[in-house]
Image (cartoon, helix red, strand yellow):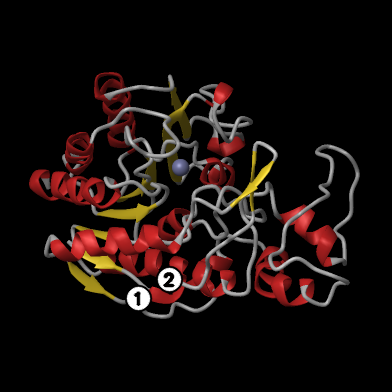
Amino acid sequence: MKVVYSDLHQNHDPQLFLLRGRFKRSNEQPERAYRLLSAVQKDGHEIVAPADYGSGPRACIHSPEYLRFLETAWARWQLLDDPSEEVMPNIHPFPGQPSSYPESVVGQAGFHMGDNACSIGEHTWVAATASADVATHAAQLVLDGQRAAYALCRPPGHHAYTDRANGFCYLNNAAIAAQYLRQRYTRVAILDLDVHHGNGTQGIFYRRADVLTISLHGDPRNFTPFFTGYAHERGEAEGLGYNINKPLPLGTDLTGYLPALRDACASVKAFSPGALVVALGLDAHEHDPYKGMRISTSDFAVLLSHIAELGLPTVLVQEGGYLSEDLGPNLVSALKGFETAA
Ligand SMILES: [Zn+2]
């Protein structure tokens, strides 16, 4: 399978990450991409560099204010009195209360950054836009006739909303790829296997009927992102019925996962899309630091084989999956499962 990869992610190495009240180095490190790349290289996949797609694809998904903020925030932050190395929010607007868009970069950080897991450093914008190009290029390969292509995106994207970063994500790569595929296909489906709910993707398409969003993830009652990912969130207005959440108990193994995946695939089939985007998180793995589920390395092949059997042009977009010895093998297994069944 063609693997799209750009090394422009490597200087994005967020150091500020607030977890349960403690500052830690982010789990979302460049080493993740190196391990994924090395694994697919060793397995004989062809690596291709993305073209530069300019601002068009990201502007179809994200607001102009948000894109301007992401691009300029770090440089503006450095002009503050005694600033931190990375942009981090410390005040937020209150949902449902009257509020105005602030001029100050401190206020804008609170407006556009949903948590303390998406700090912005000097190189974040370059990495995020390159990651969006990687996803767009994989979508272009599929439009050009490839049955499937894999986008080795870093930073990941599925938590990013139209105008808000969170959970290591800045630009929603899967949403950008899906919208790009809409050039040709009337309907596109996004199937999110990351162990965390694809909250940003849900938010972006929540009122639309042309993009079906399905997410399988750890039950948010006790797992991030907590506020979304419940089965009753089904879309709104025209989009009602086109968002499907399948929260699964923490610790779910293949036996528990497969029925939910089969249901999800049946919903994709019923929607009859022209193409599919898989938000391919690998953090449901049993040894992932998040410990949300107990999917094994070989199980990923099983999951992806079911998805391949849908017979759709498919863009696989890398989401989460954190440092463990199994990260590279998990990706190789997933791609093998897809290719064997395709
Ligand atoms: Zn995740």
Camera-nearest residue between 6 and 99: 6
- The disc placed on residue 50 is 1
Residue occupying the point 30% across, 24% down: 257
- The disc placed on residue 100 is none
Amino acid type of disc 1?
Pro
Left or right of 62, for residue 314: left
Left or right of 251, for residue 341: left
User: Within 10 angstroms of label 2, few (less than 14), some, or many (20 or more) residues?
Assistant: many
Asked whether the viewer can see residue 181, the reply is no
The quarter holding residue 206 reads: top right
Percent across and percent down for residue 94 are 84, 40
Amino acid type of disc 2?
Asp
Left or right of 233, for residue 341: left
Respond yes or no on whether mark 2 lies under 8 Å from ligand 1: no
Which residue is disc 2 drawn over? Answer: 133
Respond yes or no on whether mark 1 lies under 8 Å from ligand 1: no
| Mark closest to the chain's N terminus, 1 or 2 | 1
Camera-nearest residue between 154 and 186: 154
